[in-house]
Amino acid sequence: MIVLRMGLLTLALLTTCVVAQDVSFREYMVYEFDEKRFAPNDSKPTLYKISLAGKADALWVEGTDYNYQWLTIVPYAGIEHIKLQRRRGNPYVHDTGSWIGRQLAKAGDIRGWFTISFVDRKGKDREVVLLAPVKEDRELADVLRGKIELELEIEGEAEKLATPSPVVNAPPAPTSVAAPLPEPTVPPTPTTPTPVKVKLIDLMTVSEFRAAGLGKLKDAELSELDAWINRFLAQER
C-alpha cells in the first residue's frame, strides 16, 4: 500500500511538472500559405483560428477551426530566425477589393505578426506566420527569447516591447491655490438626432459574414442591403 501511494505521488508530481511547463496563449491565428492545408472552400492564403501552446521543447500550433485541423510543431532547437512585424498595414494579406479582403488587410493595424523560420523534426526548412493581438505578442516574444539564443528582429513600433522607464514622481503641488472662477453656464442648443446608420460589416465577424454568404456580394449590392436594413429599423422606431 505504501509503495502504491508513493508511486501515485510520484506520478502526480511528474504530471504537475509536465503541465507546469506548458504556456498557453489566447486568440492567436495562423496565416496559412501551404495550398495542401487550405480549407475546402479557400483558394488563397488566409487566416485560421488556432490553439497555441509553448511546450517544454517545441511550440505547438494546432488548428481549432472546424475546417482547419492541422498540427504544426516548431522545435525551439530548430528555430533559425524570428521576425516580429508591428508596422501599420498587413505585410502578408493584401486588400483584394472584397469585404473580407479589406478586413484581413486591416488586421495588421492592430496586431503583431511573428514570422518564424525553423527546421522541423524531419530536417525540412519550414516557415510559420502567427498573428497575435498586440497585448499578447510580448508574451510570446518573452517565451521565445527564453527558449532560444537568437535575437528577435522587430520592425515597427519596437518601443512597445522595450522595458518601461521608471516612473518619475512629480513635484508636490502648492498647498494654497486660488480657486478658478466658475464659467457661466450656457444652455445647450437643441440638436436634431441624426439617424444611426447600421452596417452589416460592423455587426458581424469575418467568419459570420462568410458563413452567411455575404462575401459573394459586390460593394453596391452590400450597400443596398445596408440601406434596406436602415429603412426597416427607422420604420420600427
Image: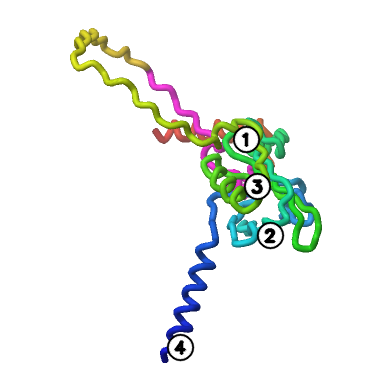
Residue 75: percent from the left, percent from the top? 69, 58
- Dot 2 lies on which element? strand
Closer-to-camera residue (229/179): 179
Crowding at dot 4, Cα within 10 Å, few <14 / some 14-19 / many 20+, comes out as: few
The span from disc 4 to disc 2 (Cα, nearest Å) is 36 Å
Which residue of the protein is positioned furthest toward the bottom in this rendering? Answer: 1
Residue 85: percent from the left, percent from the top? 66, 37
The numbered mark, 1 or 3, whose residue comes first in the sequence reads 1
What's the amino acid at mark 1? Arg
Residue 117: numbered disc:
none
Q: Which color scheme did the rendering employ for the protein?
A: rainbow
Question: Range of the magenta residues?
Answer: 192-214
The residue indicated by pointer 2 is: 73
The residue indicated by pointer 4 is: 4
Residue 86: numbered disc:
1
The numbered mark, 2 or 3, whose residue comes first in the sequence reads 2
Viewer-side label of 4, 3: 4
Residue 130: numbered disc:
3
Closer-to-camera residue (230/180): 180
The span from disc 1 to disc 4 (Cα, nearest Å) is 54 Å
Q: Is residue 227 above or below residue 203?
A: above
Q: Are marks 1 and 3 in contact (CB under 8 Å)?
A: no
